[in-house]
Amino acid sequence: MTQAIALHTDRLRLREVLPGEAPEIRAGRPAGLDWLGGTPGEGSREAAGLLAAAHAAGRHRPGWGMYVLVRVEDGLVVGGMGFQGPPRDGLVEIGFDLHPDARGRGYATEALAALARRALDDTRVDTVIATTTRANTASRRVMERAGFARRPDRDGQLVYALTG
């Protein structure tokens, strides 16, 4: 079995979701993980579906998929975060989802900064982007606190970028 990649911050462990776990998470089942609220959130389920599809199509690359955000203090998964595929033309995109009861505590900012650093440490990456809607003020604040800066909008989405 493939070993999951893990990143550590002060309060979180970001653990890569393995392709074999993705269908379980997509179906809303815990996949052997302890989730805040009992089951994966909708954003995490969607991301797991994308991971499963990429794996089935032979496009998944270890380290460049979904990660669960495990809170160190109690071992609960508070959300998911991950890349929307491996680096392409020096760019990777990150998306994230946090359980409502974990919001407002800085977990998303901490995880986004760590995952973006991991990407920028790779010589194939010079820019990390993340997108959100104009109405999603909380996500915009997360990206700004993690050091991302606004870029021109794309397809009706606000684009934020961090460069190395």
Image (tube, rainbow, N blue to C red):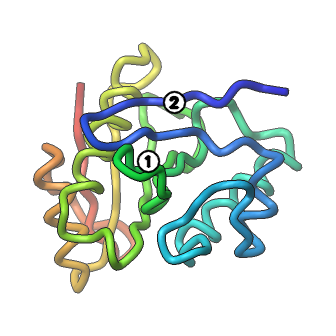
Q: Which of these two is toward me, 105 or 81?
A: 105
Q: At which x and y percent is residue 46?
A: 63, 70
8 vs 16: above or below: above
Residue drawn where x is 85% and y is 39% of the image = 58
Q: Which residue is mark 1?
A: 93
Q: Which mark is residue 6?
A: 2
Q: At which x and y percent is residue 6?
A: 51, 30
The answer to whether 75 appears left or right of 49 in the picture is left
- Residue 125 sits in quarter: top left
41 vs 86: above or below: below
- Residue 23 sits in quarter: bottom right
- Which residue is outermost to the top? 123
Q: Amino acid at mark 1?
A: Glu
- Which residue is outermost to the front? 74
Q: At which x and y percent is residue 145?
A: 11, 52
- Residue 152 sits in quarter: bottom left
90 vs 17: above or below: above
Q: Which mark is residue 68?
A: none
Q: Quadrant of the image for the N terminus?
A: top right
Q: Secondary structure at mark 2?
A: strand
Q: At which x and y percent is residue 47?
A: 61, 62
Sort mark 1 into few (<14), some (14-19) or many (20+) by Cα contacts within 10 Å. many
The answer to whether 53 appears left or right of 8 in the picture is right
122 vs 137: above or below: above
Q: Quadrant of the image for the C terminus?
A: top left
Image depth: mark 1 or mark 2 in front? 2
